[in-house]
Image (cartoon, rainbow, N blue to C red):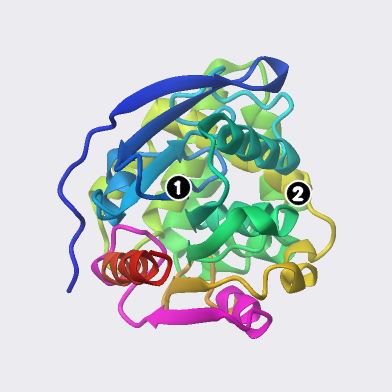
Amino acid sequence: MQQLYPELKPYREFFLPVTHGHSLYVELCGNPQGMPVVVIHGGPGGGCGPSSRRFFDPNDYHIILLDQRGAGRSLPHASLEANTTQHLIEDFELLRCELGISKWLLFGGSWGATLALAYAQAHPNRALGLILRGVFLGRQKDVDWIYEAGGASRMFADYWQVFQKPLVNTDAEATGEMVNTYYKLLCGTDELKRFAAAKAWAAWEGSIATLNPRPHLGNDFSDGHFALALARIECHYFVNQCFFESNQLLKNMHKISHLPGIIVHGRYDMICPAEQAFEVHALWQACQLHIVRDAGHAQQEPGIVDNLIKATREFAVKLA
């Protein structure tokens, strides 16, 4: 089974100014003359971490990581202003031009897979191919599965009770609209309620991300700084249907069906059920689909790591 490459430090770090006062953190790693690959993080609002650099042979790849608007080390932190899918696509295009890159490989998981598909469909002539993990299509039913009663809540009733706690004596008790009520708390003026809601939102996601329990992952998700960006930005996107037209990604698959791609998806993914990967694969002739039998959603799970490393090695050979 393949393991992550050794820890790797960036050779360059900088902030990229974009529109509406946002400044995006960027780091460059590996071989500047290698195949360019852009790492598109999840969430939205998750940010890139040190392990995100380690899926690529640094001798073969020029590894480019960017924290999206409001996420990670980008500024202003947790900002929702001018923070839409269209803005993020424009940001990646600005970064590509800034670095003088003609085409690059797209590597994204969860929301990162969503954004990779949206970017590639908007700019198919700028993509060498796509490696996707834990496909999320951003439809209302996909959001409802995670954050409304009747989906993942049925599998994790104990964690769901904790997720409901910040909504006691709110509209959600009467309407059952978890996302909309959380959004009001996360955008409210009461700082204590805002942080409590953010931690509960992020902890719910971290608790159901893996097949086998990994308590430290839940602890990472409930870190206050990380949780606030994740919860606020995710809620912002989800109440706005991810700024997509109805079923947009599947309708536009014909624009990228010629591009090579590899999808890695955990069989027991409780955040993004595997049907979404099958739906994309059915419309993508040049794509491989690998269902990992002993994995959930998180990219750190051994079976997911193994398949992603194999995917990056395959692309290194295929596109050399």
Q: Taking 313 as reference, is 77 left or right?
A: right
Disc 1 element: strand
Q: Which residue is mark 2?
A: 174
Q: Which residue is mark 1?
A: 39
Q: Residue furthest right?
A: 245
> Who's the residue at 47% across and 47% down the image?
38
- As measured in the structure, the alpha-carbon distance from the residue carrying label 2 to the one carrying label 1 is 41 Å
Whether the magenta-drawn stretch holds residue 294 is answered as yes
At which x and y percent is residue 248?
Answer: 79, 62
> Who's the residue at 49% across and 81% down the image?
288
The quarter of the displayed image where residue 5 is located: bottom left
Total marks shown come to 2
The quarter of the displayed image where residue 79 is located: top right
Q: Taking 76 as reference, is 218 left or right?
A: left
Quarter of the image that includes the N terminus = bottom left
The image shows residue 81, relative to residue 152, as above or below, that is above
Q: Which residues are magenta?
A: 276-303
Quarter of the image that includes the C terminus = bottom left
| Numbered circle sitting on residue 290 | none
Q: Answer whether residue 169 is visible to the viewer in this image.
A: no
